[in-house]
């Protein structure tokens, strides 16, 4: 499932790196849990993408790379996240 999601984000938004966080990352997801992913791309605006994908609700935050340098506190929620692809 996660390979398909990252492929879709690569094609649709030009993302290159992905971190899974939240209930799916800490193995507490239920059938109704959303899939929380933080994605990064070389350039562009910050985007929040929420959509239904193959019966899963995706909650995806997409950031340009330069945000990593400017907003370290924003990424504290990624603690214990799982890197899906670098």
Image (spheres, grey):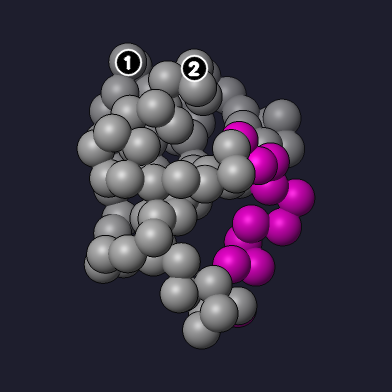
| Image location of residue 69, percent across then percent down | 55, 79
Examine the rendering and report whether any part of residue 61 can be seen: no
Q: How many marks?
A: 2
| Image location of residue 37, percent across then percent down | 49, 44
Element class at badge 2: loop
- Neighbor class of circle 2 (other Cα within 10 Å; few <14, some 14-19, many 20+) is few
Residue occupying the point 30% across, 55% down: 48
Question: For the view shown, which residue lies furthest in the front direction?
Answer: 42
Q: Say whether residue 82 is magenta.
A: yes
Examine the rendering and report whether any part of residue 17 can be seen: yes
Say whether marks 1 and 2 touch (CB < 8 Å): yes
Q: Nearer the viewer, mark 1 or mark 2?
A: 2
Would residue 16 be found to the left or right of residue 14 on screen? right
Element class at badge 1: loop
Q: Which mark is residue 54?
A: 1
Q: Can you say whether 26 is above or below 53 in the image?
A: below
> Within the image, what quadrant is residue 62 found in?
bottom left
Q: Say whether residue 5 is magenta.
A: no
Residue occupying the point 68% across, 47% down: 81
Residue occupying the point 28% across, 33% down: 11
For the record, the magenta segment spans: 73-84
Q: Which mark is residue 1?
A: 2
Quarter of the image for the C terminus: give it. top right
């Amino acid at each position: 499932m996660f390979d398909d999601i990252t492929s879709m984000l690569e094609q649709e938004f030009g993302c290159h790196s992905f971190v899974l966080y939240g209930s799916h990352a800490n193995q507490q997801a239920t059938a109704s849990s959303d899939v929380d992913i933080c994605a990064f791309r070389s350039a562009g605006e910050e985007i929040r993408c929420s959509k239904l994908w193959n019966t899963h609700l995706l909650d995806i935050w997409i950031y340009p790379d330069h945000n990593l340098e400017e907003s370290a506190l924003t990424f504290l929620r990624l603690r214990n996240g799982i890197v899906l692809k670098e």
